[in-house]
Image: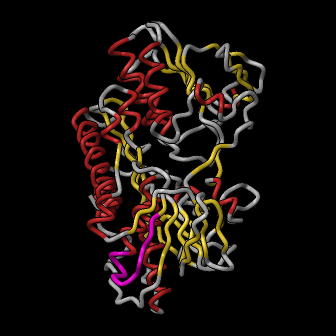
């Protein structure tokens, strides 16, 4: 990622951040609309935002959002819960805003199957709904068994906490119960996976918790990669805030885990190295959410290929896939990218129903990470569509070697970013 000076970087994150509460277009397209019914499957950052913006762009379009859970717990800021800074309710969001403020029909149910030829979805209870356009935002599923000894049942003992909610609570309880002087292991997967900087912010936030309550403890990051997002910034922050507390082991040095003994809490690397821990946060390799595979939308890698201008599936016509499940590189699998994709997709869907030309979009991503509650770092980028692909036109990370005040401001910006993106997604 390119390095930027302070002024250029702040301009960039300001421009990208403004898109959170606005749209991915220089002028928001409000189309008369010829009606139609759009079903959105999945109520995370991608699905909720898309439902919201379809109603904003096409006032006459009926939108139905199908989501199994009555509340959505965000992965962004879930690490602050592990740090003891925030409570679970702070990352909990409902759908009343979309229902009351945007007129979105909310169905709390699980989609069992999709019939793209007949343009129907069938719910687990047997009810079938028809659509004119379908937007899938299924998030991620885990590749259980990719690490020997680790399956869905094992996650009740060794949490991944990569889908916030109950898993966050399990990991928090284990940290609270751990002895002072214990070892916490965090094992991130190889690329691609949801929220590339997330495991390293998690290490930071857990270190903050341990420093306050169990200062003799250590954190060991066993990585399936040889480098990670915002690495120099994280390492600079760790040295300043947690000297000697966090150790990172890259894949080529024995960090790539291939097996775990869940009961003994021992991990085994591909080099045969053994690591014993008191608490293990094992984040397995990922793929598109299971309904995407059921609907026949995935490729051989388990992700969903799309037209990067509209996010329409390259497999099924009038079916769109956004968020973590889609193949939208160089856009990362992040909440902000999902929000940007959702707005572009919403315009594409309404334009297709309206029979009008879709406005030319931009795509944005801004990602803040906390090293301490008062020490923030970030990455920002702006992308454009050209010749059938998405390319980055500007981007960078926050400068290294900055003052404590600069880092405090970024931490405050992180909080503002979170409140803006969740309010935008859930129309709250």
**Does residue 337 appear anywhere in the picture?**
no
Q: Which portion, as a residue range, is magenta?
A: 55-65
Dividing the picture into quarters, in which one does residue 212 lie? top left
Q: Residue 270: image x %, image y %?
A: 77, 27
**Magenta stretch: includes residue 52:** no
In the foreground, 237 or 73? 73
Q: Residue 100: image x %, image y %?
A: 27, 65
The colouring scheme, among rainbow, by chain, secondary structure or one colour, is secondary structure
Q: Residue 359: image x %, image y %?
A: 42, 83
Q: Report whether 428 appears left or right of 295.
A: left
Q: Report whether 384 appears left or right of 254.
A: left
**Magenta stretch: includes residue 57:** yes
**In the picture shown, does residue 332 fall above or below 386?**
above
**In the picture shown, does residue 207 fall above or below 117?**
above
At 46% across and 15% down in the image, what residue appears? 244
At 61% across and 53% down in the image, what residue appears? 289
Looking at the rendering, in which quadrant would you find the C terminus?
A: bottom left
Q: Report whether 383 appears left or right of 5.
A: right
In the foreground, 389 or 340? 340
**In the picture shown, does residue 225 fall above or below 360?**
above
Q: Residue 234: image x %, image y %?
A: 44, 33
At 39% across and 20% down in the image, what residue appears? 242
Dividing the picture into quarters, in which one does residue 257 lie? top right
Q: Report whether 354 appears left or right of 114.
A: left
Dividing the picture into quarters, in which one does residue 376 lie? top left
In the foreground, 239 or 310? 310
**Does residue 102 appear anywhere in the picture?**
yes
- Extreme residue toward the front, this view: 126
How many numbered marks appear? 0
């Amino acid at each position: 990622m390119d390095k930027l000076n302070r002024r250029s970087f702040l301009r960039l994150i300001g421009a990208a951040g403004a898109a959170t509460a606005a749209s991915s277009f220089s002028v928001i397209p409000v189309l008369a609309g010829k009606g139609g019914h759009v079903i959105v499957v999945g109520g995370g950052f991608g699905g909720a935002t898309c439902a919201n913006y379809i109603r904003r762009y096409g006032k006459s379009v009926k939108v139905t959002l199908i989501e199994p859970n009555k509340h959505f717990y965000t992965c962004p800021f879930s690490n602050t819960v592990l740090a003891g800074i925030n409570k679970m309710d702070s990352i909990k969001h409902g759908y009343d805003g979309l229902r009351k403020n945007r007129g979105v029909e909310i169905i709390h149910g699980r989609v069992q199957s999709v019939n793209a030829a007949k343009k129907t979805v069938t719910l687990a209870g047997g009810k079938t709904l028809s659509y004119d356009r379908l937007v899938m935002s299924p998030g991620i599923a885990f590749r259980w068994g990719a690490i020997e000894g680790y399956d869905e049942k094992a996650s009740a003992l060794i949490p991944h906490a990569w889908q916030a909610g109950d898993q966050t609570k399990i990991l928090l309880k284990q940290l609270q119960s751990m002895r002072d002087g214990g070892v916490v292991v965090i094992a991130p997967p190889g690329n691609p996976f949801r929220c590339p900087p997330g495991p390293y912010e998690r290490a930071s936030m857990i270190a903050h918790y341990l420093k306050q309550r169990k200062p003799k403890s250590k954190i060991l990051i066993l990585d399936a990669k040889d480098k990670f997002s915002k690495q120099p910034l994280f390492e600079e922050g760790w040295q300043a805030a947690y000297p000697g507390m966090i150790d990172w082991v890259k894949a080529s040095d024995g960090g790539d885990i291939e097996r775990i003994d869940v009961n003994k809490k021992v991990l085994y690397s591909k080099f045969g190295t053994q690591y014993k821990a008191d608490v293990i946060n094992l984040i397995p390799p990922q793929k598109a959410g299971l309904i995407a595979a059921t609907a026949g939308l995935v490729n051989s890698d388990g992700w969903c290929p799309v037209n990067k201008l509209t996010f329409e599936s390259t497999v099924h016509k009038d079916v769109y896939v956004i968020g973590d499940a889609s193949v939208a590189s160089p856009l990362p699998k992040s909440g902000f990218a999902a929000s940007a994709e959702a707005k572009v997709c919403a315009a594409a869907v309404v334009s297709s129903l309206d029979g009008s030309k879709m406005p030319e979009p931009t795509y944005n991503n801004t990602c803040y990470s906390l090293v301490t509650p008062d020490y923030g770092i970030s990455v920002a980028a702006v992308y454009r569509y050209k010749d059938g692909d998405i390319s980055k036109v500007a981007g960078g990370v926050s400068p290294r070697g900055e003052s404590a005040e600069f880092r405090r401001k970024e931490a405050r910006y992180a909080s503002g970013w979170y409140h803006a993106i969740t309010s935008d997604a859930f129309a709250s």
